[in-house]
Amino acid sequence: MSGEERGGVPLTNLDQPLFDGAGATKRDLVDYLDAVRDRILPVLSDRPLSVVRVLRGQGPFMQKNVPKYTPDFVKTVKVWAEASKREISYAVCDDRKTLLWFANQRAIEYHTTLTYAGTWNQSHICIDLDPPEGAGFATAVAAAKLVRQALADSGLEGAVKTSGAKGVHVFVPITEHEIDDVAAATRAIAARAERVDPALATTAFIKEDRGGKVFLDATRSGGVTVVAAYSPRLRPGTPVSFPVSWSDVDSVTPSDFTIHTVPKLLAGDPWAEALPAPQALPADLVEEGHTIPVARVQAMHEGKRRAKARREAGEE
């Protein structure tokens, strides 16, 4: 049903369930995003946006290219996608009207690049920490502390937030550097964190090589996206990726932060308040990172090598 409007955006079917297990309606999503707009818009602003949508009767899908019916008030930026050899028109969510339009489109998750629209200027380093199968959030938190130690040993500091799923993200605001140097520094931070406790965490990109350890994902650079702070997640109960202080990270769980609970927890902007000022990357960190192979490339070559070995073993 139509008939409601907010911020100049017509809203429809507000009382329908958001998705199976959401424990929320589309109205709850709209209300949540509107309530946190002053916190989420600064982290979405001026960045290419990908969203995860769930339409009625369909499975979830990630939308990068804006649909043809996108209204004119939604800003867009064209980005060349090397993998598909085509230009993609990403939305840029800079204002309340655009955010509400996405909410009405049943866009639940909000993922941005760490670079700004139209540039290769990366504003943050992000280490994504995923616990292994069967392990809980506390394991990811323990690994996040390894990253914090590695950062401190390198003269850097970062802020932590829940991913909204099982994991944790550590963000490090940085000054302007060449994009290849940022990617190298990200690899080096992960490698240094692994060396703090190699029994707990690993940088092994190939899943079968991780040995039940927390994966220190250092691939979030360049055009790779990461879920934004305050974004809802497509998970039971509709949790939210939420900033947590280092002193409190041991005493929370991802389910503490949902689209129902978060608006009541906000006295200010905890993500903006937690992030340190942009920091220059130490030369030795960048130098070390350039000696570490790019994980995806290394994994691709290793996968081919293993496939060849399996074929040869089968022929013998």
Image (spheres, rainbow, N blue to C red):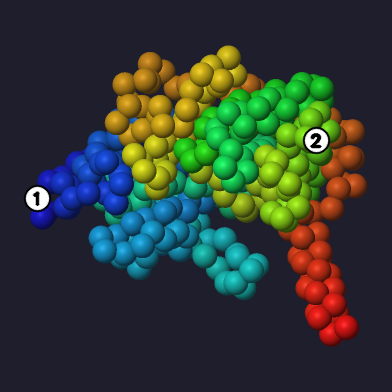
Dot label at residue 241: none
From the image, which quarter does the N terminus lie in?
bottom left
Q: What residue do we see at 73% from left, 37% from top?
A: 201
Q: What residue do we see at 55% from left, 33% from top?
A: 137
Q: Amino acid at mark 1?
A: Gly
Q: CA distance from mark 2 to mark 1?
A: 58 Å
Q: Residues within 10 Å of mark 2 (few under 14, many from 20)?
A: some
Q: Is residue 68 left or right of residue 172?
A: left
From the image, which quarter does the C terminus lie in?
bottom right
x and y percentages locating residue 132 in the rendered image: 62, 43
Q: Is residue 67 left or right of residue 202?
A: left
Q: What residue do we see at 81% from left, 64% from top?
A: 302
Element type where label 1 sits in the image = loop
Q: Quadrant of residue 155?
A: top right
Q: Is residue 222 visible?
A: yes
Q: Quadrant of residue 145?
A: top right
Residue farthest bottom in this picture? 315
x and y percentages locating residue 220 in the rendered image: 65, 47
Q: Which residue is mark 1?
A: 3
Q: Residues within 10 Å of mark 1 (few under 14, many from 20)?
A: few
Q: Is residue 41 left or right of residue 295?
A: left
Q: Which residue is mark 2?
A: 198
